[in-house]
Amino acid sequence: MYSGKTVLLIAGGGTLGTKVAEELLRLGASVEILCPEEKTSDHEKLSFHQGMGTEEVLKELFAKKRYDGIVNFIHYKEAEEYKQIHPLLMTNTDHLIFLSSYRVYANEQHPITETAPRLSDVITDPHFHETEKYAVPKALCEDYLRGERAGENWTIVRPVISFSCRRFDLLMYSRDRVIQAAKDGEVLLLPEMVKDFTAGFDWSGNSGKLIANLLFKKAAVGECFSVYSGHGMTWGQVAELYNKLIGLQVRWCSEEEYLDFHTAVKEKEILTWAWYLDRRYNRDIDCSKILGVTGLDKTDFATIEEGLKAELRRLQ
């Protein structure tokens, strides 16, 4: 399907970029990944460039070739940083995908669609806009694309939490925390209030497939998409699945006890925004828009259990 196409993944050596690359290769594209780590490839159509996604490094790449597609995974803590780099990207590709996040959504609409209010739309507190360094800059970059860059060949994607063997998430536990707790017999605290809330949570293989299949779709240009396969689970079900697969033990507790525990190990400002403006929200997301444009349906994706089993096998 993508034979003859070359796609550059900027900062694409991590959890999500790896899966996007796998799907692009399956679709016949050639893939180049720019990442800080030194990596080698055993696939004839996959190559790596070691470096950061700075203007200088990108100009060196673009001096050698133009790319059919670019997926930019960099999180810009300040929107102005992205505004400086965007024209360079746009000049050197036919289709640019910008990674925003499902975390931009407020808790105003259920199920959540792409037109649902964002946090930056409904929160007027200046402190939030000045200190929150994830959802706010993502939204500002979205506004820049829709405003000053309207009419260009870009697409905004808003992935949910995407787990892999690099990170097994459970609410605000991430990286190897869940795996290590299971090995050590540690009981993790979880707040009862979110037990029946839909988790903004999916396998990275599903998210990567969706993003890869948005490339080069005319209907995707100038649009925004929640990246979610529809295989939803509540946080209670996710906890039960970890228990089933790796023996993880959890104890459901009050919100106060949960936050007291996390405040001891996380920066308070980060905890405040991540908890109060994301994880304590019911993230039931309508994925009909992205499925419609990609031409995929729910049966094309692994279930959460299948994805977890696949990633746990990678650890063996």
Image: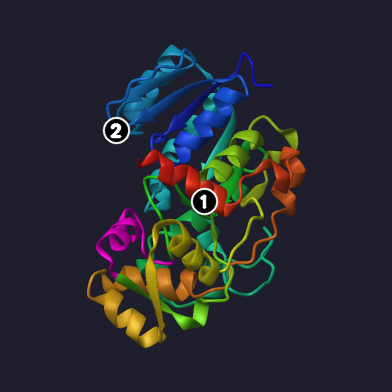
Magenta segment: 171-186
Q: State the image quarter where residue 131 is shown.
A: bottom left
* Nearest the eye: 58 or 252: 252
Q: State the image quarter where residue 274 is shown.
A: bottom left
Classify residue 89 as left or right of residue 133: right
* Nearest the eye: 272 or 23: 23
User: Badge 2: few (under 14), some or many (20 or more) residues near its Cα, within 10 Å?
Assistant: some
Amino acid tagged 2: Pro
Instruction: Give the answer, above or below, for where 203 lies relative to 36.
Output: below
Residue at coordinates 73% horizontally, 50% vertically from top-left? 289
Label count reads 2
Tag shown at residue 36: 2
> In the rendered image, which residue does mark 1 sit on?
100
Residue at coordinates 64% horizontally, 55% vertically from top-left? 231
Instruction: Give the answer, above or below, for where 236 lies relative to 155.
Output: below
On-image quarter of the C terminus: top left
Residue 281 picture location, percent across and down: 54, 73
Residue at coordinates 39% horizontally, 62% vertically from top-left? 247
Element at badge 1?
A: loop
Classify residue 302 as left or right of residue 71: right
Q: Earlier in the sequence, mark 2 or mark 1?
A: 2
Mark 2 and mark 1: span between their CA atoms? 21 Å
Q: How is the image coloured?
A: rainbow
Q: Farthest left residue?
A: 264
Residue 134 located within the stretch drawn in magenta: no
* Nearest the eye: 279 or 178: 178
Amino acid tagged 1: Ser
Residue 177 located within the stretch drawn in magenta: yes
Residue 290 picture location, percent across and down: 70, 47
